[in-house]
Amino acid sequence: MSSWLARKQEQFKQWRAEFTWKGFITDIRSSRRLVLFIVFVALLLDNMLLTTVVPIIPDYLFRLEHPQEYANIDGHGSGNSSSNTSSSLSNATYHTRSLCDLENVTSWCNVTVYLNTTATPGSNSDYAQDLRDENVEVGLLFASKAFVQLCTNPFIGPLTNKIGYSIPMFAGFVIMFLATIIFAVGESYTVLLIARMLQGIGSACSSVAGMGMLAERYPDNEERGNAMGIALGGLALGVLIGPPFGGVVYQFLGKEAPFFILAALALGDGMLQLLVLKSGVGKEVQMEGTPLLTLLRDPYIIIAAGAICFANMAIALLEPSMPLWMMETMETEKWQLGAAFLPASVSYLISTNIFGPLGHRFGRWLCSLLGMIITGICMVWIPFSDNINELIAPCFGLGFAIGMVDSSMMPTMGFLVDLRHVSVYGSVYAIADVAFCIGFALGPALSGEIVKTIGFPWLLRGIAIVNFIYSPLCYFLRDPPSAEDKQSILMEEQLPVSYTVHKQTDYQTLHDENY
C-alpha cells in the first residue's frame, strides 16, 4: 500500500512539473468530445428558448389584448398572484381556457372570474373567435425567428468557410443571450417580436457553425452520424425541456423567470466556448468550399433538404395552433399547453439517439422515407383527440418520426458534399438550416389563416398529404453518384504548388542525366 501511494505521489509530482496552462488549453481545444459538447449545449439552449415561449406567448398576448375583460381575483392555481393585474400582467394567473366554458362564460369556471362591468354577454360569446384571431399574431411572431434565420443563413455559411467556425459560434451565443434578456423584460408585442427576430440571427450562427464544426472534426461517415445524433440530442432535449419548463415556471413564477434562468445558463455556455474554441480568425481547412449556388443546383442535396423541411414543418404548424386549439376544445391549464408537446420531445430524443448511430446500417434514405410517412399518419391522428391524454400517442409518434428524418438527413448532407463536392461544410449546413427555417417560417405564418379558413383538422391533413407525396423521393438518396471531377478539384485545391515543384524537379533531373 505504501509503495502504491509513493508511486502515485511520484506520478503526481511528475505531472505537476510538466503541467503548463498553455499545454492544458491546447489539449482542451484539440479534443473532439469537448467540441461536440459545445455544440450539444448550444443547440440545447437555442431550442429551449425556441420552445419555452410556446406555452407562454399565446396566453400572455391574449391577456395583454384583453386586460379588462377577464381578471382573476382569488389567485387559485398560482403561487405569485397580484392585486393589480393591469400593472403586473406577468404575475396574474389567468387560465386562458380553464377559466370558463366557451358555451357559458359565467359558469363552469375553475376559478372565480369577475367580468368587466362594461362587458356584455354577447361580447363574451366571442371568446372562441378571439382565440382563432390570435392564431395569426402568434403565428407571425413564432415565424419571424425562422424568417430572419432564413435570410441570415446564406451569409453565415460562406462566412464560416472564410474565417472558421469559432467566431460565428461565439457571436451566436452573444446574440442569443441578448434575445433572452429582451424576452424577459419585453411587455409588448413589438418588443417580443424584436427578441424573436434577434434569436433568429443567433440561431443561424450557432447551428451552421456548430454542424460545420462537427462535420470537419468527424470525417468518417459513421463517426459523423454518431456525433450528429448526439448533437441533435441536444436539440431534442431543448425541445423536450422547453415547453413544460416554460409552462410551469410561467404559471408559478411569472413571465420573466424562465428567460432569466435561460440567460444564466447561456452565460455558462459562453464561458465554456471561450475556454475551448480557438480564438481569432482562421480557416479550419485550406480548401475553397463549393459555392452555395452550386450546392443548391445539386438535386440530391435539395432532396435531403426538402425532407428536413417538410418533416419539421409538421411540428412547426402545431406550435402556435395546437395550444389555441386545446384552449378552445379542451379544459386545459397553462402548464398543460406546454406538457402536450412532452411526448413528441421525449420520442425525438430517443429517435435521434437510435438512428444517429444506426441510420447508416439501415439506410439513411429508408429511415427518412419511413419517418415522413409516420409523420403524415400522426398529423392525421391528432385532431381526433378529445383530451390531453389522447394526444400522447400521436405526439409521441410524431416526434419519433421527425427524429428519424433529422438524424438521417443531417449526416447525409455532409456525406453528399464529401461524395460530390469539396469537403468544406459551412455552406451545405447553411442549406440544411435554411430547410429547417422554411419549415418553421411557413408553418406558423400560414397556420393562422389556414385555421381561420378551413379549420385546425384540415391544416394537419394538408401537411400530412405533403409528407406522403414527398417521401418516395428519399429513394434517390439510396446510392447517389459521385462527381466525376471531384478528385481533380481536390488536387487543384490542396496540392497546386507541390505538383508544380515535382514536375520541375523531374525535368531538371532528366536534363542532367541526358547531359
Image (spheres, rainbow, N blue to C red):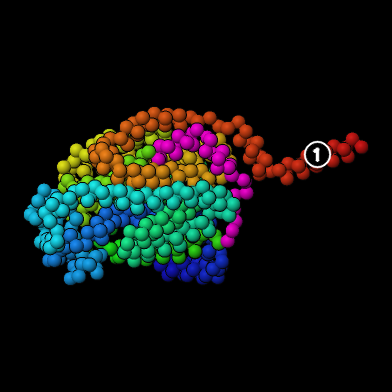
Residue at the right extreme? 515
Residue 502 visible in the picture: yes
Residue 408 appears left or right of 347: right
Residue 246 appears left or right of 97: right
Q: Is residue 361 magenta?
A: no
The quadrant of the image that shows the N terminus is bottom left
As drawn, 450 above or below 178: above
Q: Which one is in front, 52 or 88?
A: 88
Q: Which one is in front, 489 or 96?
A: 96
The magenta stretch spans which residues? Answer: 280-309
Indicate the quadrant where residue 470 lies: top left
Q: Residue at x 85, y 37 (%)?
A: 510
Percent position of residue 421, x then y? 57, 38
Residue 147 appears left or right of 329: right
Q: Residues within 10 Å of mark 1 (few under 14, many from 20)?
A: few
Residue at the left extreme? 107
Q: Which one is in front, 228 or 120?
A: 120
Percent position of residue 254, x then y? 25, 65
Q: Residue at x 92, y 37 (%)?
A: 515
Q: Residue at x 51, y 56 (%)?
A: 168
Going by the numbered disc 1, the residue's amino acid type is Asp
Percent position of residue 432, x then y? 46, 43
